[in-house]
Image (tube, grey):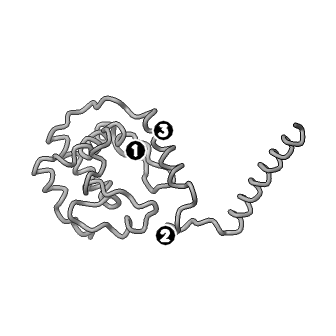
Amino acid sequence: MRSFIGGMIAAFILMIVAVIVYVDSGSMPIATSARPLPLERYLAHRALHEKVEKEMPRTVPIAADESNYLAGAMLYLDNCAVCHGRPGQPMTAIANGMYPKPPELLHGKGVTDDAPGETYWKVVNGIRLSGMPGFKGALSDTQAWQVSVLLANADKLPASVQAMLAAPAKPHP
């Protein structure tokens, strides 16, 4: 029994040394264009899902109405569109250069199948190692909810909101 435990400890130490050598050798894929490591996607998605499910708010404190959609659309265009895109527009160079690729939130189902509380958690906290920043402190709680409610209902927005989101981006001076 003693030799078995000693072997397990030695194997564990050897595994740690191998990982350190792998990282220190410069062989670990770090570029956004590199293929993901084995289990990387699974572990990242699983950890995110479990954390969000545990901590996301279950009730929405604002109405899903046109005024909140319009406010959310303005916030989306100012803070989110550069990575997550605009309806009918190609993805930006910033989005194309990211790994993992940011989801197109207003194309296809986006996050309309996610609870608004899930999107709110992601807006406020961000997602580590994904490029998704947390907007806590940059957006008020109401603003974070407005973006979240907009995205949760992106498949059924009024024409006024759709037109705002689809308008071509204004060039920077």
Say whether disc 1 or disc 2 marks the residue closer to the N-terminus: 2
The quarter of the picture where the C terminus appears is bottom left
**Mark 2 residue type:** Ser
Front-most of 5 and 25? 5
Give x and y (percent) for residue 109.
26, 51
Say whether disc 1 or disc 3 marks the residue closer to the N-terminus: 3
- Give the residue at mark 1: 122
- Mark 1 is surrounded, within 10 Å at the Cα level, by few (under 14), some (14 to 19) or many (20 or more) other residues, namely many
Say whether disc 2 or disc 3 marks the residue closer to the N-terminus: 2
Measured in 3D between alpha carbons, the distance from the residue under mark 2 to the one under mark 3, in whole angstroms, is 27 Å
Q: Residue furthest left?
A: 159
Give x and y (percent) for residue 92.
32, 67
Q: Secondary structure at mark 3?
A: helix
Q: Secondary structure at mark 1?
A: helix
Asked whether, in this view, residue 166 is left or right of residue 122, the answer is: left
Give x and y (percent) for residue 56.
40, 34
- The nearer-to-camera label among 1 and 2 is 2
Asked whether, in this view, residue 81 is left or right of residue 70, the answer is: right
* Dots 1, 2 in contact, CB < 8 A: no
- The nearer-to-camera label among 1 and 3 is 3
- Residue at image coords 44%, 33%: 55
- Give the residue at mark 3: 51
- Residue at image coords 47%, 48%: 45
- Give the residue at mark 2: 33
- Mark 3 is surrounded, within 10 Å at the Cα level, by few (under 14), some (14 to 19) or many (20 or more) other residues, namely few
**Mark 1 residue type:** Lys
Residue 142, quarter of picture:
top left
Asked whether, in this view, residue 147 is left or right of residue 126, the answer is: left
Q: Secondary structure at mark 2?
A: loop
Front-most of 58 and 92? 58
